[in-house]
Amino acid sequence: MSKIVPCLWFAGEAEQAAQFYVSLLPGSRIDNIQRSVVDTPGGPEGSVLVVEFTVAGQPFMALNGGTPLPFNHAVSFKIDCVDQAEVDRLWDALLAEGGEPVACGWLRDRYGLSWQIVPADALKLFAGSNREGAKRPMQAMMQMVKLDVGALQRAYEGV
């Protein structure tokens, strides 16, 4: 059991959001759905109040709080992708049905939550011992919206 669990506030779509998030990665599941025993700002008695779910081993809680409170970039979730195919798959899934691309591997999904879809080796390129080589993929990334694994590697190599 994780001691710290991020709680995501939704106006009323906590269950739909949790179902969407668990569909993205292996090791994901809905753990518990708690229905309200009284009327709350998030809904009437019997409606979904809290959804506990796990995405790729990380526990989360989604709360139907009633009042819409928009997410912002101050909190985002980074997904380390093994290859370009995983970057592409997750990018497309998170943009579906109203998501919005931002820049440098960032996007906002249909619920407004910010994600960083990053090749797992990207940070190694930026921190490589070849300082000039490390600058090139960082500069290349600053021009990208969705990250391109091959282009970042080629930039590091100076190709």
Image: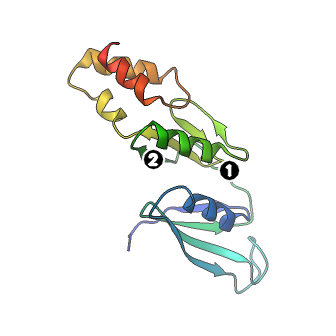
Q: Is residue 158 left or right of residue 22?
A: left
Q: CA distance from mark 2 to mark 1?
A: 21 Å
Left or right side of 94 for 105: left
Query: Seen from this angle, which residue lies furthest right?
Result: 44
Is 151 or 98 nearer to us in this picture? 151
Quadrant for residue 132, please give it: top left
Q: Which mark is residue 79?
A: 2
Which numbered disc, 2 or 1, marks the residue closer to the eye?
Answer: 2
Identify the amino acid type marked 2: Ile
Point out residue 127 in the picture as x, y percentages from the top left corner.
Answer: 27, 29
Residue highlighted by disc 1: 70
Q: Residue at coordinates 68% horizontally, 50% vertically from top-left?
A: 70
Within 10 Å of the Cα at label 2, are there few (<14), some (14-19), or many (20+) other Cα atoms?
some
Does residue 8 appear left or right of residue 68 in this picture?
A: left
Q: Could you tell me the amino acid type at mark 1?
A: Pro
- Image quadrant in which you'd find residue 36: bottom right
> In this rendering, would 125 be left or right of 81?
left
For the C terminus, the image quarter is top left
Q: Give coordinates of residue 91: x percent, y percent.
A: 57, 41
Residue drawn 46% across and 46% down? 78
Secondary structure, mark 2, is strand
Outermost residue on the bottom side: it is 37
Badge 1 element: loop
Earlier sequence position, callout 2 versus callout 1: 1
Report x, y in % for residue 97. 73, 47
